[in-house]
Amino acid sequence: MSAVDKAFHGLRHMIATGRLGAGERIPPEADLCAELGVSRGSLREAVRMLAALGVIEPRHGSGTYVSQLRPEDLIGSLSLTLQLLPLPGLLEVYEIRRVLEAHVAAQAAARATPETVGTLFSLIEAMEATEDPTEASDLDHRFHAEIARAAGNPTLASLLAVFRARSRKYQVFTLPEGPDLRRKSDADHRVLATAIAAHDPGAAAGAAEAHVAQTERWLRALEPPVEDEGA
């Protein structure tokens, strides 16, 4: 085990066992280095790694603290690795996404307010009106994010946002078949929103699962290239 790994796992153990609690300032560098048997450089690198994961928060002029360890924030850090998935790996994740999207749709149907329903149909109308595939993708993301928000579990919403972020890098709407696929997708959205508006959890779950499964079939069949963020 390298010195950086030793420092990383040492700090992680302190947090996991509750020795360092959420929001607590971590001990001075000299004390930690002595306890863990590592150099300041190795400790600082471990702190940077944990900060990237949302576990530790360096605060300028104040010190370094354990984050609030909110599950939705820690789940969000999965994007660091899930954003690297090639299409075959992403398609494996779709099995999880089908289950979770169905669950949050059912919860949203049980809890949706008139404001939520209004937002969903406004997003659908905007999706149907736009000719820009990029704008359509953004609106699609906001539509599903609103359903997840309405379900009332920020951690699930965060996890699904991570899944969708990678999915959006494989765009089927920009392909020659895109316009037809968008029309089908928009129709699916209306079925889903209508079930939520009717406060029908079973219908909402079925509509969400079918919609995600359809997207998965398109990705398998069409194998779109991943978008180049630097382009």
Image (cartoon, rainbow, N blue to C red):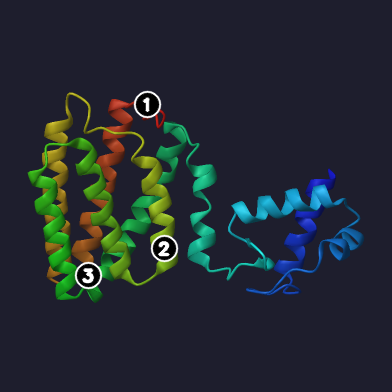
* Quarter in which the N terminus is drawn: top right
Looking at this rendering, what residue extends furthest in the front direction?
61
Q: Distance between the residues labelled 2 and 3?
A: 16 Å
**Residue at (18% x, 63% y) in the render:** 203
Identify the image quadrant of residue 130: top left
Residue receiving disc 3: 109
| Amino acid marked by disc 1 | Ala
**Res. 1 mark:** none
Horizontal and vertical percent position of residue 131: 11, 37
**Left or right, 122 with reference to 19:** left
Q: Nearer the viewer, residue 49 or 154?
A: 49
SS state under label 3: helix
Residue receiving disc 1: 231
Residue receiving disc 2: 156
Mark 2 closeness class: few <14, some 14–19, many ≥20 residues within 10 Å:
many
**Residue at (16% x, 55% y) in the render:** 123
Q: How many labels does the image show?
A: 3
* Quarter in which the C terminus is drawn: top left
| Amino acid marked by disc 3 | Ala
Horizontal and vertical percent position of residue 81: 54, 43
Horizontal and vertical percent position of residue 89: 47, 36
Q: Nearer the viewer, mark 2 or mark 3?
A: 2
